[in-house]
Amino acid sequence: MQKNIIKLFIISLIIFVIGVFFIGLNKSSIYDTKDLVGQKISKIQLDHFSDNRIITEEDLKKNDFTLINFWASWCAPCRDEHAMLLKLNNDEKNLKILGVNFKDKKDNALKFLKDLGDPYDDLARDEFGKHSINFGIYGIPESILIDKDLVIIKKFIGPISKNDYSFIKQIVRKQ
Amino acid sequence: MLSNIGNTLLSLNILIGISIIYFSFQNLSSSKVLIGRKIYHLCLFQSTFIIICFLTLVSAFIVSDFSIITVYQNSHSLKPLLYKISGTWGNHEGSLLLWVIILTIFSFFFLLYNKNHPKNYKIYSLIIQNILILGFLFFLLFSSNPFSMVSPIPKEGLGLNPILQDPALAIHPPLLYVGFVGSSIYFSAAIASLITNYSGKLFAQSIKNWVLISWSFQTLGILAGSIWAYYELGWGGFWFWDPVENASLLPWFAMTALLHSLIVLEKRSLLYFWVIILCLLTFILSVTGTFLVRSGILNSVHTFANDPSRGLYILIFLSLMIFASVLLFFNKFKSSNYNLNSNSKETFILINNWFMIFYLLTVLLGTVYPIFTEVLTEHKVSVGPPFYNTVIIPIVVIFLFFMSVGPRTQWIKNKFYNLNLLFKILIVSIFINFSIIYIFKSYSLMSNFIIISALFLIFASLIDLYKSLKKQNIEFPRVISHLAFGFLILFIGLNYNFSIEKDFNLKVGEKKNFENYSIEFQNLKLEDFQNYKAVIGEFKINKSDENLNQFLFPEIRIYEKPSTITYEASIRSNLLKDYYITMSNIDRSEYYNIKFQKKPFMMWIWISVIFISLGGFLRFFKNAKKYY
């Protein structure tokens, strides 16, 4: 009797694990950025970098377009794209840039912005990289362009290039 | 052309596989004592054809036949020959073909080299192995065909990912595959053993060399991957607990446990069912690892392709394998009572197994946990090095102590010898540990424990080494592996505690001083190479208290096909330490971001691992001499 219970337990465990793998298999496309386009971001909760408040989806709904940019002071390609971000912030009035400082030290991040300029309209902090995972971020820099309704227009993996820059400009100015 | 040859050979192999299974069943029902000549011949053809099939793909890569999609996607006519060849297995389809080759060759050799075992046992092993071969052949042909054509034929290929163009990585997959695909043969043998009730000492002898050879190769394969990560990923680390690395480590734990408990089965005819579980588990973990890595269910730095349909196929195959083996096991399992003396060798080998299973479960849990949380709670998490380090490191200390004491026990008897000696070794180890702290610098409590226990194992093994050299006894391979393992942990511990890492920005002509090092950015030049352009920096490292004058040349490489930038570390290795520099450009500025590292004993970490696997090879050759 006891033996049968053990057998049953082992077999259910195996079925459970395989079941989870099976469901996971169909879910894994979340990482695929192509499928992200057109999806709506439902819930955002990010700690503000300096103020003691939480940035939520309500804040982003106020902007016509928002570029969420994930960066860190230790990341070399982030320096690459910084000029593009500054330019975007300067020229495009329809676009707000939300920076998410990823797994970084506060002092280093502040020094980075002081040295290279601050392109961000708002800055959030994700010290342990926990919240960024919800955006499907697996390496930085990455950026997500969303509209007023929080629908993802495009996701950029790696630094924002000149082409990406023109693409964003074109989208934002259409309105 | 090549594509047709390849496809024909693959289809032919499916037919041969089916006929081997058919003739094997025929042979089983006949009263013949011997395995028919026909079966041997078929197996020989099977191996030959699959090797030719693989060579066909290799030649397609060499002559850059871009009519084949795999070649088009992973090669380029300007690539150096070595990387054209290694490109064959640097992708999903080609590496799967390598899988099938190893399954097939192992199947043939197992049949060939186990002459003295009962016919039914061998035939059933052959049948099971051929079912596995067929499963992978179907997968290859219908879902991951390496010979698929592309039309119109492209003029030029897309190129192999530059970070895969590396000598260590060129040999890494074949080594690793001999390891974990090789474990298929004792999976098949274990099933055959359950079906035919062929257990005990003789069963252990029939598989032990296969376990040894796959274990040794697996060890080397993990090493090659680790060296590659160290040189190529440019972070200066050599183990990142990345899911892909974990996938190679999981079967290694199971194999190591098997390697040890097999000795008990051979010497004392005990633990039969436990050995069977480990045989089954090793290959199941290998396939699980392949599933996790190839299906894209886990995101990792080196996942090949995210194709859920492939994942589904492997998952179905895996489930069938698991259920078939578990049900058969339940059907045959008989519980037996072991009366082991608590201080006998049997007990200590079992203890080794508990540790291995503990490591295995920890790593397995850490690897699949993100999938579970995502599916069950919609939360995405990532499990990083802190988890593994906190759980595994304290246990390693205890493990090392058992590892030193274990071999000093005897079979059956409840007796230790030389307890006194062990105590002396402990004192010496503690003394050396504190001398290191006194002369160099102090480190954390945990590091103290790690270094003491590693030294303890090293001294205990050295004494064994001396004894075995004097008496010429057979324990030599074991001593080598254990000694090397002790050194591995010691060097990792020292490396961890005595590494220096420094990050700063420099422009050409500038000099940076810190501690007693100075680093001078002397020159910067642009050079053209066959398949990339490189910005090469020239750095001079000096130390205030000695005339070091080391020059390092880190590179930023710009590859055209596919267009990628990679940062190549420059490493000066010598026996005691590595100097390691990477540089990256800062946009709109003449400054470069420099990362300097001093890493002591890196070379010895690699050498230790080579010696660990050497122990396996030595034992293999000794056995081979004895039995064949």
Image (cartoon, coloured by chain):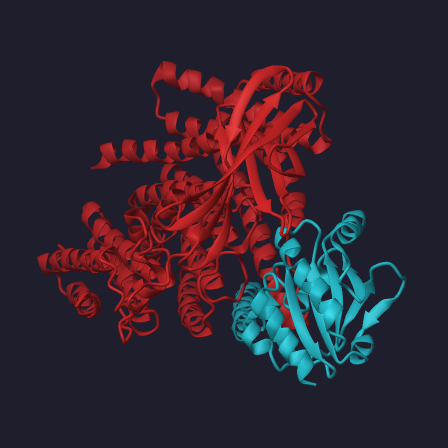
Chain colours: A cyan, B red
Q: Is residue B469 left or right of residue A173?
A: left
Residue A134 in sight from this viewpoint: yes
* Residue furthest out toward the bottom: A175
Horizontal placement of B486 versus B166: left or right? right
**B326 versus B201 height, above or below:** below
Q: Quadrant of the C terminus of chain B?
A: top left
x, y percent for residue B135: 32, 68
Residue at (40, 36) in percent of width and height: B613
Can residue A16 be seen at all in this image of the molecule?
A: no
Left or right, residue B451 beside residue A48:
left
Position of residue B294 measured from the top left corner of the image (x, y, whole percent): 45, 63
* Farthest-out residue, left: B37
Q: Nearer the viewer, residue A157 or B182?
A: A157
Q: Nearer the viewer, residue A93 or B278?
A: A93
Residue B49 to residue B570: above or below: below
Left/right of residue A72 with respect to residue B528 in the rendered view: right
